[in-house]
Amino acid sequence: MKTRFIITIIMAMGLFIGHSNAQVDLINDEFPEAKQEVMETFGAIAQSIKEGDMDGLIAFHAYGPKFTEFKNGEPRNGGVDNEAFERNTFGAVTEVVKLDANDLQIAVYGDVANMTFHSDFHLKFGEDLVVVNNQISLLFVKTNDGWKIVHEHHSPLSSE
């Protein structure tokens, strides 16, 4: 009985060690489950914007000393400025006419994911319609609370 138990333990350890030595190719592996999770997170972000849920929108960010944002060719800013901008801008939207993310690509590198797309956002602020055509990169990190944005980059999309 004792021999059988020891053999079982050795076999289990061999399976564990064999599994832990499996090579993960962070550059080429697609990580389809994580990719789907990031896409679902992005859908929830869009929904929070459509519903005017600013606390919900802000909750998708991991603000802290590492958070960074580039936009409009201005110097980099951090979480405090990003949160204020998002609350002031998206909080003032009276109607989301269109919130398209064209040429969307998600690249997952384990617990980090980069999402890039061309925005075609049509937002109403009262009677004024604002069209936002930007190149956007969102960097996500997987946390215990799901995928969170840790970096944003927004650049005007050339009309050519």
Image (cartoon, rainbow, N blue to C red):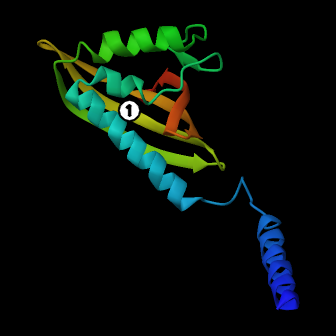
Q: Is 129 placed left or right of 83 in the picture?
A: left
Residue 99 x %, y %: 28, 34
Q: Amino acid at mark 1?
A: Ser
Q: Quadrant of residue 129?
A: top left
- For residue 91, side relative to residue 79 (left or right): left
Which residue bears the numbered disc 1? 119
For residue 138, say whether it is visible: yes
User: Residue 44: x and y, percent?
Assistant: 34, 39
Residue under the point 50% across and 9% down = 80
2 is higher (above) or lower (below) than 103: below
Circle 1 SS class: strand
> Farthest residue toward the front?
1
**Of 76 and 155, the residue lying toward us:** 76
Q: Quadrant of residue 123?
A: top left
| Residue 100, x across and y down, in percent | 31, 38
Q: Is residue 20 above or below residue 111?
A: below
- Name above or below for residue 34 compared with residue 129: below
Picture quarter with the N terminus:
bottom right
Closer-to-camera residue (1/57):
1
